[in-house]
Image (tube, grey):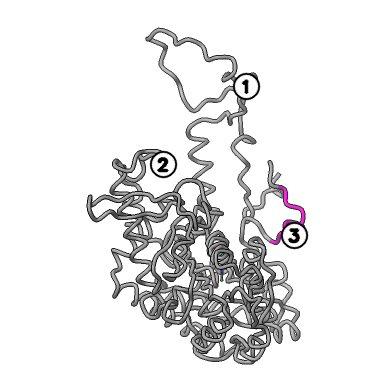
Amino acid sequence: MMEEFAPDRIVEPLLVEQAVPKRRGYLFAPLDVPQAAPLDDVFARNSVARLPEASELDTVRHFSKLSTMAYGVDYGFYPLGSCTMKYNPKVNEVTASMEGFTDIHPLQDEDSLQGCLALMYRTLKDLSELLGMKWGSLQACAGAHGEYTGLKIIRTYFLHHNEMGRNRILIPVSAHGTNPASANMNGFEVQEVATDERGLVDLNDLESKLDDTVAGIMLTNPNTLGLFEKDIRKIASMVHEAGGLLYYDGANFNALMGMARPGDMGFDVVHLNLHKTFSTPHGGGGPGSGPVLVKKELVPFIPQPDIVYHEDSGKYGFKWNEETSCGKVSGFWGNFLVVVRAFTYILSMGSDGLKAASRHAVLNANYMQALLKKEYSVPYDVICKHEFVLSLSNLKERTSVSALDIAKGLIDFGYHPPTMYFPMIVHEALMFEPTETESKDTLDGICKAMLQLKDMAEKDGGWLHDSPHHAVIGRVDEVRAAKNPVVRY
Ligand SMILES: Cc1ncc(COP(=O)(O)O)c(C=O)c1O
């Protein structure tokens, strides 16, 4: 019996698996009012619902245990790069739980939604100001959805101007996989642009790919190596001269918030990830929000309905039937409560606070990079922005301990692993993004763990090949999970 007991890996069964027949978590009082008429047959179920037969205490314990098995940013350090897993201040939750925001219905008439419409309008105004854009839409529900929407706007713009031949989108090799996917879903052909020895867009390669079939270029700046594209103004004029547009993937805006504006760099269309830069919850598949903001020339093509303010009546409303609009990209108005959280963040930080957040994010990344580069190799060894990338290929060659082994080893030290094997141009990559809210103590702690793991790799990599040793789930077959996902219980 004791042999079966493995305290390090206690897996909590599902509540239905723990069910005991006839066990209940509730007791109804005897009926003391007349029985209602039975449900019409079309609405009545014809089999017994398969609900967990559990007591209230069973249920509370089950969910309490599960909550201790999950790792989130409220639990510990979470340095996923290009993902900005930043702390979500609790004041955001306070406003997002207010009845005036939660007890509304999307089909309510505009007059009874003035506060909500004002909030959406003001959020769009503030985001436009921060990005150097004219106006936008809050409909998209994720970063990738924002990319899809932004490229749909570009597509519609060129169709409107009878430039049907512009069907190529240029994307650097270091880009996130959602970029080519979004371009492809909009019917564009994707062409890669090389990265030069500095880790930046290779201008000669870009030049050779520009002609009148180019619709635009998609860039994130700083790029996914955490490096600022210094030639961005030059890139913008090259692409504009060829008649194309510049798309800004705002996943990395945490490095620039309040300090520099994509609009001033020459970008025409931007998406932001409110669930990254603007401190709304992230992970677990949503809900997210990917607002899209555009320059003046592209405003007629944003999704409808637009949100407008009528100066004469002092009221807010929706504007439909814009013939040039790229259409609707989401049910109703997007993830409204996520927007409430982001607006709270913007107001509570103020412009000085947003600037300070970016500065600290960049400082923290550089501090960590400086500590780790004593023992690990940094392929692009310059001052970084909000994130940086290590390459463990030398370590792997020498010791057979891979980036994956070190990342899994970090779990045993109580840290969430960084991003692994991305961007793909760096071999055995580990990408760290500490964000602004982490203290020096926390950064010192993870760096110490990283140095200790390196030492362990040099002496005896065996233990690391099997790590994590103290997590609920150890190594999983990631290839099988990706190729043969079982998504039903
Ligand atoms: C650079 C970059 N672009 C786009 C995305 C897509 O954002 P989302 O996960 O919200 O769809 C990510 C996600 O991590 C990213 O890192």
The reply to whether callout 2 and callout 1 are in contact (CB within 8 Å) is no
Mark 3–mark 1 Cα distance, whole angstroms, equals 37 Å
Q: Residue at point 47% right, 60% down?
A: 302
Going by the numbered disc 3, the residue's amino acid type is: Asp
The reply to whether callout 3 and callout 1 are in contact (CB within 8 Å) is no
SS class, disc 1 = loop
Indicate which disc residue 477 carries: 3
Q: Is residue 138 above or below residue 455?
A: above
- Residue 138: image location, x then y, percent: 44, 57
- Residue 249: image location, x then y, percent: 53, 71
10 Å neighbourhood of mark 3: few (<14), some, or many (≥20)?
few
Q: Quadrant of the N terminus?
A: top right
Nearer the observer, disc 2 or disc 1? 2
Q: Is residue 364 above or below residue 337?
A: below
Mark 2–mark 3 Cα distance, whole angstroms, equals 43 Å
Tell me if I can see residue 388 in this picture: no
Tell me the residue that label 1 is attached to: 48
Residue 480 lies in magenta, yes or no? yes
- Residue 268: image location, x then y, percent: 48, 73
Q: Which residues are magenta?
A: 475-486
Quadrant of the image occupied by residue 478 = bottom right
Farthest residue, direction top: 34
Going by the numbered disc 2, the residue's amino acid type is: Pro
Q: Nearer the viewer, residue 269 or 394?
A: 269
Indicate which disc residue 106 carries: 2
10 Å neighbourhood of mark 2: few (<14), some, or many (≥20)?
few
Instruction: Answer with mark 2 or mark 1, whichever residue precedes in sequence.
Output: 1
Going by the numbered disc 1, the residue's amino acid type is: Val
Residue 10 lies in magenta, yes or no? no
